[in-house]
Image: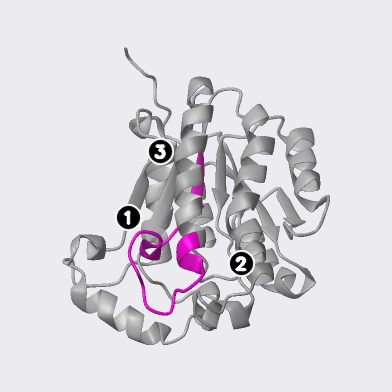
Amino acid sequence: MTVEIPRPPLKGKKALVVGIANENSIAYGCAKAFRELEADVAITYLNEKSKQYVEPLAKALDAPIIMPLNVSKPGELEAVFDAITKQWGKLDILVHSIAFAPMQDLQGGLLNCSAEGFAQAMDISCHSFIRMAKLAAPLMTEGGSMFAMSYHGATEVAPNYNVMGPVKAALESACRYLAYELGPQGVRVHAISPGPLKTRAASGLKDFDLLLNEAAQRAPLGELVDIMDIGFTCAFLATPYARRLTGNTVYVDGGVNIMA
């Protein structure tokens, strides 16, 4: 079967990117990559404090939709999808790049993680992706792609990753089950597992600089990845070139995950 692929391959596609905090965010790398392939992007920001950092980035991306989104606040997620429905009437790409755990639960080890902290980490970091997928799927009338950001600590023990390890494991499993459920309508779902990056989210991890140095030393390619490496991987997976790929956990880490 011959598939007609537009040039650039995402021209005219509509993408929602959730999780930009500043210019160092993985989500920003994704949005930039989509724009380079001429997709239109909708951007969200967490709150008024982060708005000042995200607004200039949205302007640089010519984003026609920029809205607040705290997935813990009732109604905000639905408002974003209402705006997308009203302005675009469809959606082709969804990027979920948000995670959170209370600092005391994140840094105190898994044994000391409170039930409340575990539940909050699971809700924001994992279940919110399922909620987004449920709202996005009806808009993906011509198929589409969904991405959630994971980490190697989901499958191997990463010292100091603590509660986020089990939470990211649940997220990767959710991606596989969503790939199965949404496959019949042509929607593909992937977990993306980047190598360590200096992002605001990573700053909450204890001894993160040691993790960065170790990753650079162990990577077969001999260097760390950057946000555009993750962005262009997602962009490729969103194109028709990857039309038979779904349900994967895709490592973008310079090969660190293959090392014993």
Residue most toward the top?
1
Q: Secondary structure at mark 2?
A: helix
Q: Residue at label 2?
A: 118
The answer to whether 158 appears left or right of 35 in the picture is: left
Q: Residue at label 1?
A: 251
Q: Which mark is residue 247?
A: 3
Q: Position of residue 143 (x, y in %)?
A: 53, 26
Q: Nearer the viewer, mark 1 or mark 2?
A: 2
| Amino acid type at mark 1 | Tyr
Query: How far apart are labels 2 and 3 at the CA level?
Result: 25 Å
The answer to whether 112 appears left or right of 85 in the picture is: left
Q: Which residues are magenta?
A: 146-166
Residue sitting at x 50%, y 20%: 184
Q: Position of residue 92 (x, y in %)?
A: 57, 34
Q: Earlier in the sequence, mark 1 or mark 2?
A: 2
Residue most toward the front?
111
Query: How far apart are labels 1 and 2 at the CA level?
Result: 25 Å
Q: Are marks 3 and 1 in contact (CB under 8 Å)?
A: no
